[in-house]
């Protein structure tokens, strides 16, 4: 299967996931809409990474693009924090259908764009002060070169990009520490597996069980952004993640972490990069 076919197969899977996720306790769409002061835990963690690279006002009054935005809870959270001209891009039309409904119910005007994050700059004819992506995104992209160049081209000169995502070492362990079972380094081709489950709570399953992922090690992530002309301002390996990926994890203020008795390994990584001023 070539990359185009694999991405199309993943799109069907994520269209199904969207139906499950909008009903899940994890996303708690109704609770989110009922409390206009709520910001998603994902965005709260992302902002902690991004804040040192922003003015004291944070994202307020800055234009923002959220790549691989899924059902829009995080995108609306950025708008609630004061970002303006907010755009959300995702390849799943059903995810965007729910995102439009959620944003409309929240009273925020957000521009939703359907498409591949690798081609975002060809789909959006403007630049942004801030571009963000996080929480289970880049494993769904076959390569990062076009993705990074697109991010560069979408940023205003002096604009900032941030990614926080599952650490690639977890994929090498198939999220089952402590045995290496898969590639850590990128470039090993497509990883295809069957899985009817998804990361939210409850027993609901998808019918499109075939998943296609691509490994991207930390060096590849940083290198692709540098090759695209961005300046790296920060790299971090973090001891927490957004979802309980395996049984050993315990709740913590940021989401989930390993107990004190476990070996200390990174669960997330974060990179902040900036387009050099003109």
Image: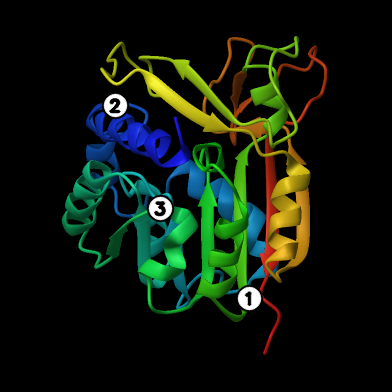
Pointers 1 and 3 in contact (C-beta within 8 Å) = no
**What's the distance in space between the residues labelled 3 and 2, CA to CA?**
25 Å
Front position in the image: 264 or 216: 216
- Residue with the most extreme front position: 1
Tell me the element at label 2.
Answer: loop
Residue 187, picture quadrant: top right
Whichever of labels 1 and 3 marks the residue nearer the N terminus, that label is 1
| Residue position for label 2 | 24
User: Which mark is drawn over residue 277?
Assistant: none
Front position in the image: 10 or 37: 10
Whichever of labels 2 and 1 marks the residue nearer the N terminus, that label is 2
Up/down of 84 relative to 144, above or below: below
**What's the distance in space between the residues labelled 1 and 3, CA to CA?**
30 Å
Circle 2 residues within 10 Å: few <14, some 14–19, many ≥20? some
Q: Quadrant of the C terminus?
A: bottom right
Q: For the residues carrying marks 1 and 3, which lies nearer the camera in this image?
A: 3
| Residue position for label 3 | 116
* Residue at position x 73%, y 64% in the image: 227
Tell me the element at label 1.
Answer: loop
Whichever of labels 3 and 2 marks the residue nearer the N terminus, that label is 2
Q: Position of residue 26 (x, y in %)?
A: 37, 29
Let me know if residue 251 appears in the view: yes
Q: Position of residue 4 (x, y in %)?
A: 41, 42
Circle 1 residues within 10 Å: few <14, some 14–19, many ≥20? few
Up/down of 108 relative to 56, above or below: above
Tell me the element at label 3.
Answer: loop
Q: For the residues carrying marks 2 and 1, which lies nearer the camera in this image?
A: 2
Q: Position of residue 69 (x, y in %)?
A: 39, 50
| Residue position for label 1 | 55
**What's the distance in space between the residues labelled 2 and 1, CA to CA?**
35 Å
């Amino acid at each position: 299967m070539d990359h185009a076919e694999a991405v199309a197969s993943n799109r069907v899977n994520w269209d199904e996931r969207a139906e499950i996720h909008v009903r899940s306790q994890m996303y708690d769409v109704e609770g989110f809409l009922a409390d206009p002061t709520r910001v998603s835990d994902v965005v709260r963690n992302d902002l902690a990474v991004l804040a040192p690279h922003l003015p004291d006002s944070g994202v307020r009054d800055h234009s923002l693009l959220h790549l691989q935005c899924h059902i829009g809870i995080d995108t609306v959270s950025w708008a609630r924090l004061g970002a303006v001209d907010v755009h959300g891009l995702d390849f799943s039309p059903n995810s965007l259908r729910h995102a439009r409904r959620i944003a409309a119910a929240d009273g925020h005007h957000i521009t939703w764009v359907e498409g591949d994050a690798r081609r975002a700059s060809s789909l959006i004819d403007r630049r942004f002060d801030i571009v963000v992506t996080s929480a289970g995104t880049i494993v769904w992209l076959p390569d990062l070169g076009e993705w990074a160049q697109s991010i560069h081209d979408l940023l205003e000169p002096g604009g900032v990009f941030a990614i926080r995502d599952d650490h690639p070492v977890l994929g090498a362990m198939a999220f089952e520490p402590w045995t290496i079972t898969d590639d850590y380094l990128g470039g090993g081709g497509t990883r295809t597996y069957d899985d009817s489950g998804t990361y939210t709570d409850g027993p609901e399953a998808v019918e499109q069980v075939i998943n296609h992922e691509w490994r991207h090690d930390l060096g590849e992530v940083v290198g692709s952004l540098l090759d695209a002309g961005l300046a790296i301002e920060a790299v971090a390996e973090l001891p927490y993640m957004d979802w309980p990926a395996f049984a050993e994890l315990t709740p913590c203020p940021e989401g989930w972490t390993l107990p004190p008795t476990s070996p200390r390994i990174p669960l997330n990584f974060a990179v902040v990069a900036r387009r050099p001023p003109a």
